[in-house]
Image: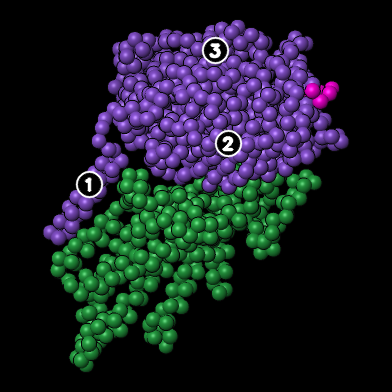
Chain colours: A purple, B green
Amino acid sequence: MKRSSRSRRIAGAAAVVGALLATAACGGGGSDDEGSGAGFNAAVKGVAAKSAKKGGTLKFINKQEFDSLDPQRQYYGFAWDFSRFYARQLISYTPKPGNAANELTPDLATSTGKITNGGKTYTYTLRDGITWEDGSPITSKDVKYGIERIWAKDVVSGGPGYLRQVLDPKGEYKGPYKDKSKDKLGLKAIQTPDDKTIVFNLAKPNGDFEQMLAMPTGSPVKADKDTGAKYTNRPFSSGPYKVQSYTPGKSLSLVRNTSWKKASDPIRPALPDKVTVTFNSNLEAIDRLLIKGDYDVFLSATGMTPSGRNDALKHNKGNVDNITTSFVRYVDFTTKVKPLDNIHCRKAVIYGTDYKSLQTTRGGPQAGGDIATNMLPKSVKGSDNYDPYGILKRGGKADVAKAKDELKQCGKPGGFSTSIVARNDQPAEVDAAEALQASLKKVGISLNVEPIQGSTSASITGSPAVMKKRGYGLSMTGWGPDFPTGQGFSQPLIDGRFIEQTGNYNVSETNNAEINKYFDDALKETDPSKAGAIYQKMNHKVSDLAVQMPFIYEKNITWRSSRLTNAFTSAAYNGRYDYSQLGVVK
Amino acid sequence: MFAVVVMLLVVTLTTFAIFFVIPKWAGADPALLFVGKQADPAAIEGIRQKLSLGDPVLVQFWHFVQGLFVGRDYANGTDVTHCPAPCFGYSFRTEQAVWPQLTDAMPVTLSLAAGACLLWLVGGITTGVVSALRRGTLWDRSAMTVALAGVSLPIYFTGLLSLAIFSYSLKWVNVDYKGLGDDPAMWFESLILPWITLAFLYAAMYARLTRATMLEIMGEDYIRTARAKGLRERVVIGRHAMRSTWTPVLTLLGLDLGALLGGAVLTETTYNLPGLGRLAVNAITEKDLPVILGVTLIAAVFIVVANLVVDLLYAVIDPRVRLG
């Protein structure tokens, strides 16, 4: 007995010594050292290390594999940002820092669309000198063929379906692989009168149509280079780089596409000679390798690990950016589950919530984000500081008196019990749900935390019937925009006509005529500012109805290597650096 | 041999059922996993047809087994792709055939397992024997303390610690894996830390097992007889005691090696080694069912083969097994 406890003590001591050794080894001596980087937040405030110098290898590292390299199949945000190296669209986002990036700018086209026919017809002319990697010209038919591929949902699965919905809402076209026409260009809604002109005929006006074209789904594909489902392994390049080698889960290497001409591309400076991505299964190791200088950028930009960011902030603060993403972390109220069908019960939860504690579970103001007071992220037009529940005024703390008053008004003066769903493969969601549980206990609301697997969320939180049957009153979740407008962010979450029986994102089952009409009115607007004003009213209405409870506008700590040039964060790419602009010093 | 084939079939059927039947009962759908974020009903139906998910499970299983032995065709409209034997299907994510992914990953796991196994056998058995022979001495106490630390500290702790010290800080070793054929020096360098870390964990267990077995055997009658016959101590230990010690060590080795070859998940994840373990983790994260199925089956084969080899080795080491 004596020997055993002594052995344990020695083993414990050895472990502690080891840990201390590691900390010392990682750390070094100084503190609050700027390091050799361009400065803390240099890429948030503007362009960090501005340069036009060409050459070198830009080295990305990532834990997560691409969902696909096929532009029509991509849905991961970082993949959209990265694909601009080898895929172009008619329209793209402006390479400028911050919210200025949200403005659309012509890419393959000579100008943004000529809109006629009451907002239903968009016409584009293609630039001169645009070529594929084999030197052949990119034609309007290539653009049409590329877009047509998203109708082949069984072969080219995974990507967003917006273009399908606006061009062929009845789903009459079956995609190029089942197309009986000779050139496989049978989609009637797109016309190509000549190789330079392309015309889109929408079923009804949609002011965000060009946002949809700017997604990688709008990329051209050369029909005779289309390998169907296998295109994901070797997409044919229309951009400044082409795929040299790709081993999923291990590495990707892009080299210059010598057929690409700078004169034909107003967006991409194409600074590095080579772009590589290495996959590493260990997040801690990724941070260490970045700090060591082996890699330049963490591709998915989801933030450093707690130990990595502490180390980076302490010793290399000049290599760190505190980026704001377009993600909102929030709680959905299931308005069909009692007693949350009563607005006062929902308001009791909002007043009873200690937002500070939820913020802390997500990493605090720097690594987690700012306290949110309404559902529109700052990068979306129409966003403002609307705070009808006075959350910021009371410093994010709970207002117990008001919560109890709301409980009385909802007929539950002693409080009530309900359940909250949180995805257990996103531990921060479970932590936040537990923090919410602790804060609501103080006002008499008893919250039961129900962890679920993220992969089953489509059939649990995505199924109104299951939510009702199991009595899940709340759901902890997060959301980022597919494109930076009220439609791109809010419509799936809050438009009553988007309630689905499976894969539902309108978890609160909000079906409010006023909100639905705001969407209709905004979609008819081709002026983004006017549409933004409508989305602002829509967002205020959502807050007033208390159907969702946002609590964080997400931020994170991102590493920027000392070699990196031309780095700036882009709102259009969810706060990541605009990858197409990056260069390296050697 | 018949038993081995039956066992592998049972493992395959069970795994198949876990991935294709249980999710169905739970209301999840493999097609839904394949389709991704915007899962409209038409897309789900298209995928279901493409993957033949509408067929009865036994038919699907039969096609899977058929693919393993004679290959199979995947038809999608007029486009027919032949997947040659052994066909484990195509990855949901990358559309690449699963078998080449397994054969790519196998040498990495084999390299890791072989090197670590050599180290832990030499280190663990030597330590165990010496500790048993010097029971109660400072050496024994120190060795068993280190062994206790070895079995108590998880690989994600010792692994990260070794990376932090020897790779990131001291920069003595580079852990960027290269294949033996591509760059032998780099292959060796990238595997040193994983070998030592993994061996440390296992050597500790083997040292404790060897010590306990040796202590028990040294008290047996036949050891006393051997000594009474005037045999030298080296012969008593080396020829008589060690022979009996090998039997439990080999049993453990069979299980450990089989399981390790099936995927040294934590080690490969910590050191970013592109082996079967990491392939499995990636496939699980991405819900890539065909790859998960492939790794599981390969792991089962390894375990069965490793145990078969151990059974054969028993006969070599212990004549009583042959006679029995």
Residue type, mark 3 in image: Lys
The answer to whether residue A444 is above or below residue B52 is above
Specify few, some or many for label 3: CA neighbours under 10 Å numbering under 14, 14-19, or 20 or more: many
Which mark is first along the chain, 2 or 3?
A: 2
Residue type, mark 2 in image: Asp
Which mark is first along the chain, 1 or 3?
A: 1
| Front tag of 2 and 1 | 2
**Which residue range is magenta in the image?**
A188-196
Check disc 2 and report the residue beneath it. A273
Residue closest to the eye, A282 or A207? A282
Check disc 3 and report the residue beneath it. A381
Work out how far the residue at label 3 is from the one at label 1, CA to CA, in angstroms: 52 Å
Give the left or right position of residue A45, taking residue B21 as reference.
left
The image quarter in which residue A121 lies: top right
The single residue placed furthest to the right in the displayed view is A182
Work out how far the residue at label 2 is from the one at label 1, CA to CA, in angstroms: 46 Å
